[in-house]
Image: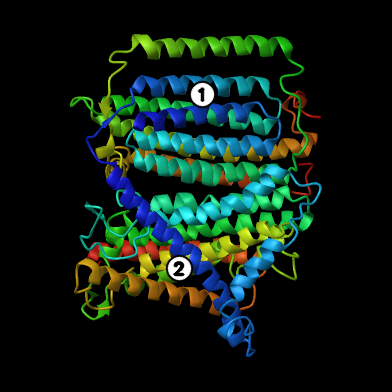
Amino acid sequence: MVTYVFLAAAALAVIFAILTVVPRNPMTNVLSLVVLFFAMAAIFAILGMDFLAAIQVIVYSGATLVLFLFVIMLLNIRKVEPFGSGRRWQAFIGTLVTAGIGAMILVIAGLLLPEHGAVLPGVAEVGTAIPIGRALLSTHLFAFEFITLLLVAAIVGAVYLGSRDDNDSG
Amino acid sequence: MWADMAVVGVKLAFVLAVMLTTVPIMVWVERRGSALIQDRLGPNRVGPFGLLQPVIDVVKLLTKENLRPEGVQTFFYLLAPAIAIAISLSTFIAVPFAQDSGLEVFGQPVNGFIVAPNLNIGILYIFAIASLAVYSVFLAGWSSDNKFSLYGGIRASAQAISYELAMTIAVVGVLMSAGSLHLQQIVDAQTGTWLGSLPGWNFFSQPIGAIIFIVAVFAETHRLPFDLPEADAELVAGYHTEYSSMGFAAFYMSEYLHMIVGASLITVFFFGGWNLPWIDIPFDGWAGALLSMSVFSAKVAFFLWFFVWVRWTLPRLRYDQLMALGWKVMIPLAILNFLWVGVGMALGYF
Amino acid sequence: MTPAEMVPVPYTWVLALSAVLFAIGAVGVLLRRNGIAIFLSLEIMLNSANLAFAAFAYRFAAGHATAAAALDGQIFVFFIIAVAAAEAAVGLALFIVLHRLKDSIDVDRANILRW
C-alpha cells in the first residue's frame, strides 16, 4: 500500500518536473514546481523524515516560490520565448550528455548497488524534530550558525541589489 | 487497518460538517453583530431574527450569472478559490478539539479527538499549509486581467508573508514551554495553575506572544484592521473583484473558514484548548468528551465574536503602516517574547 | 509514522527518481532561455540532490555502525534547503537588475558586459 503511494508520488514528481521545464508560461512552471515540492515532501514523509517534509513545504513552497512569483509579477513576464531555439547544436549535445548521465545513474542504482531490492525500516526514530534539533545545536553548531550568517548576507545583498538608486545609472 | 481508516473517516466527516455549518452561522453573526455595533437592526425579515438570511444569501449567490471576463487565464482563475477553501479545510486536521477520553468506535480506540493523532510535527504542518494560502490570493490577483486585482493580490501576499514570520516566532515560545510540536501535548501542558494562582494557560505566562499571535492571525485572515487587500471603497474589491457568483461565494466562504481555523489556533496555543480555567475536566468517556468539546467550542465562539467585534470597531490600517507594523514592531516583540520564555525556562518558571 | 516499521520502498527506487529528476532539471537549464525558467530547473536539480541524500540516510539508518549517517543525511538536506533559498533570493535580485539594464528576460541578451 505504501509502495503505491510512493509510486504515485514519484510519477507526480516526474510529470510535474516535465511541466516545469517544457511549458512556456512562467506561472505554469512555478505552480508545477509547487506540486513537485509537495510530491518530494510526500516521499520524505514515506521514508520517515517528517521534519524534513514539513521544512521542505514551509521553506520551498511557502517562501522561495512565493519569491519567484513576486519577481514574475514585478517584471510582468507574460510573453514567453520559444523552447530550445537559437542554439541548436548546443541543445542537442547537451541533451544527449544529460540523458547519458541519467541513464548511467539509473543503471548504477538498479544493478550495481548492494541490497538494491531490500526493504528497510524507515528513519522514523531520528526523523522527528527533537533528534534533528539536538544534532543541529550540538554536533553541527558551527555550520548552523554559519548558515545564519549566509542568510543575513543574502538578505543584505538582495535588498541592496533590488533597491533602485535614481542618482546612479543603475 | 480498515477500522483505523474508518475511525479517521468519521472524525474527518465530523470536523468538515461542523466547519461547513459554522460558516453560514458566522455570516449571520457578522451581519447582526455589525448591526448591533452600528446601532441599527440588521437582517430581520427572513425567518425569526433573520436566521434564514444566510440560506437566502447562498441561493442568491448560486443563481447569479457566472461571469468570466475575457482576458483572464482560465485555469488559474478557477484554481485560486479552490486553493483557498482546500487550505483552510486541510489545516484543521492537526487541531485537537476535545479530551482524549479513551473511547471506542467500531471496536477501535478513538485516538484522541484530533483527525491526525500520529502527526508528530503538528505545528510545522499547520504552518506549512497556512503558508500556501498566499497562492490563492496571488493567483486570483494575477489571473484576473485587472490592475486593481493585481494591486490587491500584491498587497495581500506581501502582508501574508510578513505576518507569517511574527506568527511563527510567537508560537515558538509556546512550543518551548510545552516541549513538543504535537498540539495534543501543547493543550495538555496548559492544565492546572501557574505560579499558584493563575490558570495554566499560555495567555497568562506569555502575554506578549499571545497578543502578537492574535494580531498576526487577524493579518493572515485579511480581517480588519488589516483588510487592505479587500478594501471595499479603496481597491473595488481587491483580489476578488473579477469573481462573481460561485467564485465569490468560494472566497467569502474561505474567509470565514480561515477565521474559524485562526480562532481554533488561538484557543489551542494560548487559551488552554479544551481545558477549564483552574480545574481539570473531572469526567472520562463520553461525558468528558462532550464537556471538553463544549468548552472548546465556547472559546472558539468567543474568538469568532471577537473577530467580528474588532472588524466593526477599528479603522483600517494604511498599507505602509501595516508593513511597518509587521516588520518593525511585531518581529522585535516576538523575539522579545522568545527571550522571555527562554529566560523563564532557565529560571524554572515554565 | 510508527517507528521501526518496515518501509516497503527500496532505496534504489528513490535514487532512480533522483536521477530522472536531475536529468529533467539539467535539460531545463540547458535549453530554456528565460532566466526564471533556468532558476526553476536549477531548483529541480537541487531537489534531486536532496532526494539522493535522503535515500542514503534511509539506507544507512538500519545498520548499527552507520546509524549516525541517517541524522547527518537529514541535516545536510536541511542545509541544502537553506542555501538554495539564499541563492534564489540573491539570484532573483540579480535577475531584476539584469532586467532593468537590458529590458528583457532572455539570458542570451546578456552577452556584452556593458550595453
User: Quick check: marks 2 and 1 in contact, CB under 8 Å?
Assistant: no
Q: Can you identify the residue that label 1 sits on?
A: C21
- Amino acid on which the number 2 mark rests in the picture: Ala
Q: Which mark is residue B263?
A: 2
In this rendering, position of residue C23 left or right of residue A142: right
Q: Residue at x 36, y 43 (%)?
A: A51
Snapshot quadrant of residue B84: bottom right
Mark 2 and mark 1 on one chain: no
Q: Residue at x 60, y 71 (%)?
A: B55
Q: Is residue B9 visible?
A: yes
Snapshot quadrant of residue B245: bottom right
Residue A19: x and y in percent read 61, 29
Q: Which mark is residue C84?
A: none
Residue A35: x and y in percent read 54, 38
SS assignment at label 1? helix
Residue at the bottom extreme, as displayed: B39
Q: Nearer the viewer, residue C50 or B64?
A: B64
